[in-house]
Image (cartoon, rainbow, N blue to C red):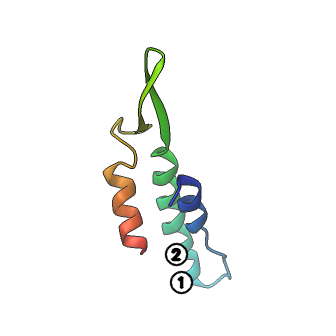
Amino acid sequence: MTHDELLASLTLPLDGSYYEQTQFKRTNALRAVVKRHYPFEFHLGDVISEIQCAECNKKYPCNTIIDIEKELK
């Protein structure tokens, strides 16, 4: 899934119950992590060498995004 699709999947409606409020906070925390691990084009001169994670500078999707997507399946 794309980065935007992953962010969209981490949206919960809040109905006011304690359980929903707790889930909402956890989901917001997870969204904050996903927002930091977004793809960007790493340029080496005039050539794009690869798409990297903006947070950990590893090939995108990085292990953080891979693990999050795996757990959401």
Give the crowd class for mark 1: few <14, some 14-19, many >=20 residues within 10 Å.
few
Please provide percent x and percent y for residue 10: 55, 66
How far, Cα to Cα, is label 1 from label 2? 6 Å
SS label for mark 1: helix
Please provide percent x and percent y for residue 52: 41, 37
Residue sitting at the far front: 47
SS label for mark 2: helix
Please provide percent x and percent y for residue 48: 45, 27
Please provide percent x and percent y for residue 14: 66, 77
Residue type (three-letter) at the residue carrying disc 1: Tyr
- Horizontal arrangement in the rendering, residue 18 relative to residue 59 (left or right): right
Picture quarter containing residue 55?
Answer: top left
**Which residue is nearer to you in this view: 8 or 52?**
52
Residue type (three-letter) at the residue carrying disc 2: Gln
On the image, numbered disc 2 is attached to which residue? 23
Which residue shows up at 58% across the image and 76% down it? 21
Which residue shows up at 48% across the image and 16% down it? 46
- Horizontal arrangement in the rendering, residue 41 relative to residue 64 (left or right): right
Number of numbered labels in the structure image? 2
Which residue shows up at 39% across the image and 49% down it? 61
| Vertical position of residue 26 compared to residue 13: above or below | above
Residue sitting at the far top: 45
On the image, numbered disc 1 is attached to which residue? 19
Looking at the rendered image, the quarter that the C terminus falls into is bottom left
**Which residue is nearer to you in this view: 64 or 27?**
64
- Residues tagged 1 and 2 counted as in contact (Cβ below 8 A): yes
Numbered badge on residue 38: none
Give the crowd class for mark 2: few <14, some 14-19, many >=20 residues within 10 Å.
some
**Which residue is nearer to you in this view: 15 or 55?**
55
| Vertical position of residue 44 compared to residue 68: above or below | above
